[in-house]
Amino acid sequence: MPKIIVLDNIAQQGLAILDQHADIEYDVCTGLAGDDLRNALLEADGVICRSGVTLNENSLIGNSRLKVIVRAGVGTDNIDKAAATR
């Protein structure tokens, strides 16, 4: 079963969409940084974030499971796109 981690607060309507899919598991894990963030990402197939978290090379290094990063909102300056595509 695919696992999604929601790293920032998103609207309840967004979580309701995830709830409609019994074949998707998700956890809301706000406030993660450093090793905690990296370890959480190692267990995820997908991540949903806003601007409250930075996904950089350190948080993405060695991650072969993560398939998709969704940025709710505008812009992607908090995502290291080069590291995310490795």
Image: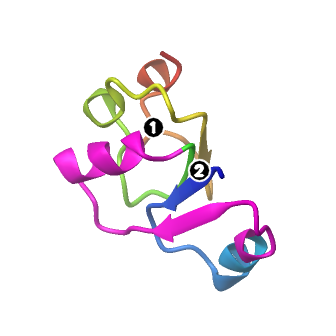
- Quarter holding residue 78: top left
In the rendered view, does 20 fall on the left or right side of 47? Answer: right
Magenta stretch holds residue 56: no
Above or below for 69 versus 49: above
Above or below for 76 versus 83: below
Spot the residue most to the left: 35
Tag 2 residue: 71
Q: Amino acid at mark 1?
A: Ile
Q: Residue at x 66, y 76 (%)?
A: 15
Q: Secondary structure at mark 1?
A: loop
Residue 23, disc: none
Q: Secondary structure at mark 2?
A: strand
Q: Residue at x 81, y 74 (%)?
A: 20
Q: Are marks 1 and 2 in contact (CB under 8 Å)?
A: yes
Above or below for 34 versus 80: below
- The disc, 1 or 2, on the residue closer to the chain's N-terminal end is 2
Q: Residues within 10 Å of mark 2 (few under 14, many from 20)?
A: some
Spot the residue most to the front: 1
Above or below for 31 versus 5: below
The x, y position of residue 54, in whole percent, is 35, 46
Tag 1 residue: 79
Q: Amino acid at mark 2?
A: Arg
Magenta span? 18-44
Q: Residues within 10 Å of mark 1 (few under 14, many from 20)?
A: many
The x, y position of residue 66, in whole percent, is 52, 35
Measure the alpha-carbon separation of dots 1 and 2. 9 Å
Q: Residue at x 59, y 50 (%)?
A: 71
